Every structure is written in C-alpha cells, then in structure tokens.
Amino acid sequence: MEDEEAGSGSVGEKLQKVLARAGLGSRRELEAVIAAGRVTVDGQVARLGDRVTPRAHVEVDGRTIQRIQRDPPRRVLIYNKPEGELTTRSDPEGRPTVFRSLPRVRGRWIAVGRLDLNSQGLMLFTTDGELANALMHPSREVEREYACRVYGEVTEEMVQRLVDGVELDDGSAHFEVVESGMPLDEPLEAGNAWYHVIVKEGRNREVRRLWESQGVKVSRLIRVRYGPVVLSRDLRRGRFRELPDAEKEALYRHAGLEPPPRRPARRPPARRGRRSSR
C-alpha cells in the first residue's frame, strides 16, 4: 500500500491525509498547518512526514480529531435540492436546511459546494473531506452545469461577452459554455428563455451575477451536473440516493484521487427453516 513503508519501521497513514479525510482542508493546506506546529500526536508536536496509526491521539489547535479503529466507508450521496432549503447545518430562524433530509452517518456529511436558498438541483455530499476539497478547489476546474431561466432579452453580443469574460466585484468571471435549451418538464413562460451554462468555479451566486451584469435576471436556476455526476430525471426533489461504486470511482478519478477500495457486499442472514411437523 502507498501509505505503508515496508521495512522502514514506519507504518500508518500520512498525517496530512488523515486530517484531510476529516474535512479540515486539502493536504497542501494541512502541510502548512503541521509545519506551523498546530498539530500534536499523542501530546507531541507533529512534524511533516509523520505517520499516525488508528490508536494515535491527534489534536489540531487543541481540538481532538476523532479517530476510529476501522475507517468508515467513504460515502457519496446525490441530492436533489428543492428551492427554500439552506445549505447550512442549522439556521437561527429555523428555516429548513439540506442536512435535515440526509441519512445519519458515522462521522459527518460534507456538502460539495453550495446552492442558495432560491436555487435547486444537484448537490453532492460525502463523508470524505479530501474528496470534497478536491472537487471544490479552483485548480481542479471541475465543471458545474446549470439550467437557467432568464427574464429579459438576450442577444448574441451579450452571450459572447459572458463567454469572453466580464468584471464582477470579486474579479473577472465567465461561462465556459452558453447554450439555449429548455430542461424537460419545465414550463416556458412569456418573457423568459432557458439556457444551459457551464462554470468551473464555485463563487457565491456566480451564475446569477454573470447574467445580471448584462441587465437580465435569472428567475429559475437548476444545477444539473457536477463533474461527471448528472442529475437523473427519476430523482425527485428533496430525495437522495447513494452513488454506486462505479460512479463513485469515476468521481474520485475526476477529482485526481485514488478511489477507495470496494467493500465486500454484506450477505443477508441465513434463514432458519421451519421443522416439518409430523
């Protein structure tokens, strides 16, 4: 295995990999945290290159990072977010959040990107912090595709500007692709037109702000794809499904990561036959 050094006397996983899996950041970011002396292992300040076993007591800035003897399965869910749900764990106003609809899991679910209150569609959730960080990091340029219902006149010149790039308040941004097309089962209303757009960043309200820079407004926004994962028609709003092994492996490879090993399927318990009465 890549995280074991036979004959060196050093076994276990690299410390930054363990911290990344716990959702604390990317491996590169966590290397800087370790180098700054903010991590301890069994009470000793950790150093770059350290490896830890499942029995090690790891702390970051004095906070214990829970470890378990056996790694939990790295799971990925696809969720069809409806409008009116917040992408947050809790809301002081008591509004519904995406996390309330998810199943319980050993560890915690990490949202891969966000959708604002008035947006809907595909969201990914995972228990693997390293995967979440890789999918969201700008350097990976993972595509996000949206169906947008736009209110107002859209000209060819506007579309060209949106592809070439426009200045927003947080820097230049652009669509990789702009194509006209209405999603299935969505009504067309007067004064509106449907477009599919692709971006490779996850900036706050980026799709809406790009359209608004051209004087038109997005009246409906649906994320239909994240990387290789596509929102299927049979997944109803507010429902989720587990990503099967083949799709999960493709997602890991798309993010530049090695997929986790498949776990053997559990056998159903044997049924005891009834004794025949004589």
Image: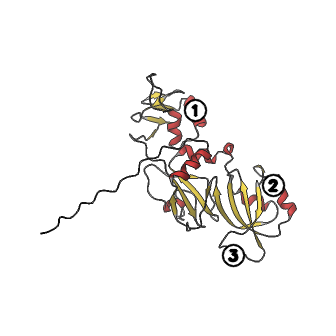
Q: Is residue 91 visible?
A: no
Comparing 235 with 270, the one in front is 270
Residue at image mark 2: 163
With 250 as the anchor, is 145 left or right in this view?
A: right
Comparing 71 with 153, the one in front is 71
**Secondary-structure class at tag 1:** helix
User: How busy is the neighbourhood of tag 2: few (under 14 within 10 Å), some, or many (20 plus)?
Assistant: some
Res 80 → quadrant = bottom right
Quarter that holds the C terminus? bottom left
Identify which amino acid the numbered label 3 is placed on: Pro
Residue 31 is marked as 1
Position in image of residue 102 (x %, y %) = 49, 59
Which residue, as the protein is rendered here, is positioned at the far front?
A: 278
Which residue, as the protein is rendered here, is positioned at the far top?
A: 8
Position in image of residue 188 (x %, y %) = 72, 75
Identify which amino acid the numbered label 1 is placed on: Glu
Which residue, as the protein is rendered here, is positioned at the far bottom?
A: 190
**Secondary-structure class at tag 3:** loop
Comparing 164 with 4, the one in front is 4
Identify which amino acid the numbered label 2 is placed on: Val
First in sequence, mark 3 or 2: give its number: 2
